[in-house]
Amino acid sequence: MVKIGVCLFPRVIYRQVVLTLPKQCRIPFHNHSNQKRLYSWFMVLAKACLSKLIQAHFKTDACEISVIVFIHTHSRNDNYNPHLHVVLAEGVFFPSN
């Protein structure tokens, strides 16, 4: 967290969200010829899903979320387990304001 601290907004509370790739998708991900592209899409999809979820909560699509997403490909016991750590700001931003 110390290194990403410079990317955070002052006086904003952040939460960590962890999103794990389902077990059924892990072998196809592991064996895919272009893992970088899959990992990139995984991160983009995660941000889009969180954004839609929060926009539904606030009942407007005029708001944006603030996120930092990074991927881990293995669990603590060294098993292949692609998962995302998302640092998510509480609340939303309204770009038009």
Image (cartoon, rainbow, N blue to C red):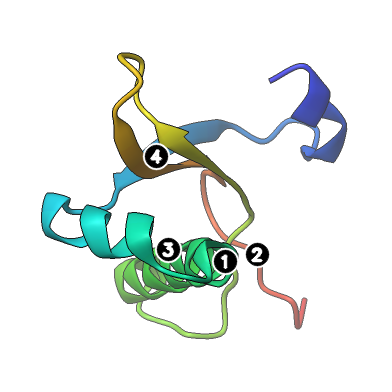
91 and 37: which is toward the camera: 37
Q: Looking at the image, do the residues carrying marks 1 and 2 touch, with CB atoms under 8 Å apart?
A: no
Kindly report the distance in space between the C-alpha atoms of the residues bearing marks 4 and 3.
Answer: 10 Å
Q: Looking at the image, do the residues carrying marks 1 and 3 touch, with CB atoms under 8 Å apart?
A: no
Residue at 65% from the left image edge and 64% from the top image edge: 93
Q: Nearer the viewer, mark 1 or mark 3?
A: 1
Where is residue 79 shown, x and y percent of the image?
Answer: 29, 27
Residue at 35% from the left image edge and 61% from the top image edge: 31
Kindly report the distance in space between the C-alpha atoms of the residues bearing marks 1 and 2.
Answer: 24 Å
Q: Which residue is mark 4?
A: 17
Kindly report the distance in space between the C-alpha atoms of the residues bearing marks 4 and 2.
Answer: 19 Å
Q: Which residue is mark 1?
A: 40
73 and 55: which is toward the camera: 73
Instruction: Judge left or right: residue 44 versus residue 57.
Output: right
Where is residue 69 shown, x and y percent of the image?
Answer: 58, 49
Q: Secondary structure at mark 1?
A: helix
